[in-house]
Every structure is written in structure tokens, then in C-alpha cells.
Amino acid sequence: MYFWQGFFLYLAPGGLLLAAALTSFQHEGLARWLFGINWLLPPALGLVAVFFGWRFNRSRLLFGVLVIMVADLLLRRYGGSAQIDQLLARYVFHMALLLLPLNLLLFSFWRERGIVTGQGLRRFVGILVQPLLLLGLYGVRGPLIVRQLEGMTVSLPLVGGVFFPALVVSVLVVVGLSFRFWRYGDLLDHGFLWAMVCSFFALLIGNSSKQTFLFSVAVLILIVAAIEAAHRMAFRDELTGLPARRALNEAMLKLGRTYTVAMVDIDFFKKFNDRYGHDVGDQVLAMVATMLTKVGGGGKPFRYGGEEFTILFPGKNTKEAQPHLEALRQAVAEAGFKVRSAGRAGKSQSNRKQGGDSGKKVSLTISIGLAQGDTARKTISQSVIKAADKALYRAKEGGRNRVSC
């Protein structure tokens, strides 16, 4: 189950968009219609990318779209049956095949610095200077470069002959972008990954109409990735990775007539934070959040704020939800928390001294209050949260590390 969830995480939506684009080529009528609007797709998608890049402060989106559209423009200018110089056309093709993946990998490492800032403008100029530098290199070593690259060809199923240097670069970039997405979960990295794969197919496909269409799909993949990233920022808590309070409010509107709300609070969190420092406190929040995701009974955890979390149990009454919350409380208490290093203690001298607790397992418990809802009306849903919050305070007054209704 977890394998397929992880597989779908890497596949959607970029891989699905690419698969849909390649499948459309098998339907003659649909393909003819898509190629008929090829003249419109690049400028239209470019304007959309400019809007989202400006509105969501995603300069990397604009840079990625820019290099894809420049590659498409150069290939259309020097490729096809009307090219003036066959050697120059092959040179442009090889350079696009090598440099486009490298640029997309580079953008994944860049931090958002804006576009109209000094650093943003320098990056923009650096991208536009690349074609000029390649043109100068062509005048000096063009024929030799083309001969050497075309002398290193390997045959692959489905795509036929591929130039070995470009294949190595593309594989390394796929590995690099996949690792970055796995390590950091950046959705724009995921977009760069599938935009690179889509562009690779576009370069190898050989048909100018299909090529322009696939480059447009690559741009669309980046736009969708930027939208997904903006959605995550609005609905996901950055520290814990759990859905945030806004997502909780929306989930409450979708509940049926029977549900249970549980409010979860980390016991003595303020004292823990003061003693070991905020960095360690953040680690505690992240660890508890991870354990909350494993709650049974169909419970859905949310970050409510501070050290408080909320768990929704759709279709469950308090009697059905309570055993799962008891198991969660016990699991947290048994797990405890291991202070990782003295360097993570607070900045004050007393906290640094107490950093001697590094590596020591300390007690960690949670208190839980739960309440049952019996209607889907919004006003009542909020009252159920308040009732669960009152039950939480009863759990704390009763000695903490317990579940209270």
C-alpha cells in the first residue's frame, strides 16, 4: 500500500500529464486539433507562467519556463525542413539536449530571490547569454563538437538512437531531482523533474509539431507544480507537514452527521521548550505530528496551533474513537523523546549548560480531549471543537497524560 502511495506521489501530476500528451498522439483527430493550436500554446502558457511567477513569487518557475521556450524557439528556427544550415541545426539540437536538463537542475538549487532584484536580474541575464555563448562556441569548434557527439550514439527501445553524453546527463539530472524531491518534498523540484523528462521526449521525437506541443506540456507541468506549491503553503503546516488550520476548517464543512473531534496537547511543552531550546521544541512537535499520522480508526490529524493538534474521526462517535486515542497516548508516552545534541539547546548560558542532557531520553506525554458532533452545520462544528477543548483542559487538570470526554 505504502509503495503505491509513494509511486503515485512521484507520478502525479507531471507524469500523468506527460502520459496524457503522449497518448493523444495515438488519436489522429485529437492530435490534429492540438497541433492546430500550437501557435497559441507557447505565448498563452508563457503569460500564465508570468502571472503565477509574479503573484506567488516563484522566480524559478519563470526561469524554467524561459529556458524551455528559448529551446523550443531555437529548435523551430534552425530545425525542420527549412533550416539554412544543417550543421548548425544539429549543433543547436545537441546543445539543447545537454543544457536544458542542466539548467532545470540548477534552478532546483536556487532559492527564491525575486526577478526585479539584483540577483534575479543577474540570473535572467545569465540565461539569455547562454545562446550567445553557444553561438560563439559554434564559430570556433562547431563542426568538431557535432562530430564527436554524433560519434557516441547508443540505441534504446522506443526512442531509438540516443547520444550517450545527453543520456548520461539526463539520467543524472533525473536522479538528482528525484533525490531532492524525496529529501525536501519541494513540489517545484517535482515539476522540474517531469518538465525535464517531457522536454527529453520533445527533443527526441523529431516532429516539429509534436516537439512544440510537448515543450508546451513541459511548461504546463511547471505551472501546475507552482499552483500545487502555493496550495501546500496555504493548507499545510511547514514544520510538521500536517494539514493546517485552514484545511481543518474546510474538512469540518464536509463532515457528516456523526463525527468526533479530538484536541491533542503536548504536556509541559513550554517548560520543555525553555529548558532545551526552540530547535528541540520543533523536533518534538515534528515527532508528535508523525505519530499522530499513525492514529487508527480513520483519524485525520491537523496542526491547530502552537503545541495543539486536532484529530477528526468522520463517522465515529466518542466510544468508537476513544480506544484509538488511548493507543496513541500510550505510544507517545512509551516512545519518549531523545535530545539529539547539545548544540540544539537554547542560546542562553543556562540552556547551554543544560545541553548536557544531550542523548538522554526524556519523558514526553500528551493530553487529549474529545467531543462528539451530531450535525453538519458549521456553527455546531465550531462548538464541538470548543467542547473538545474543554475536555482537554479537564484531562490536564486531572493529571495530564490521559484522554477525557
Image: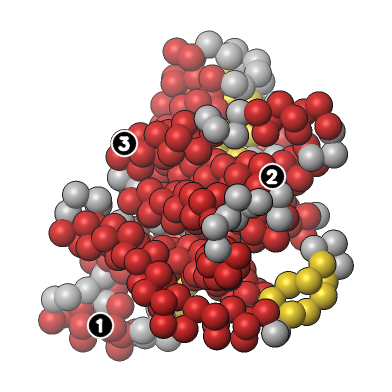
- How would you rate the neighbour count of disc 2 (Cα within 10 Å): few for under 14, some for 14-19, many for 20 or more? many
**Which label sits in the foreground, 3 or 2?**
2
* Dot 1 and dot 2 residues touching (CB under 8 Å): no
**Mark toward the start of the polypeptide (3 vs 1):** 3
Residue receiving disc 3 = 55
In the picture shown, does residue 41 fall above or below 331?
A: above
* Dot 3 and dot 2 residues touching (CB under 8 Å): no
How far apart in space, not on screen, are marks 1 and 2 (Cα)? Answer: 64 Å
Please identify the quarter of the rendering in which residue 158 is found: bottom right
Dot 1: element: helix
Residue 390, position as x, y percentages in the image:
41, 32
Image quadrant for the N terminus? bottom right
Residue 331, position as x, y percentages in the image:
61, 61
**Which label sits in the foreground, 3 or 1?**
3
Residue type, mark 2 in image: Lys
Q: Residue at x 61, y 16 (%)?
A: 374
Residue receiving disc 1 = 354
Residue receiving disc 2 = 210
In the picture shown, does residue 227 fall above or below 268?
A: above
Dot 2: element: helix
The residue nearer to you, when weighing 178 against 345, is 178
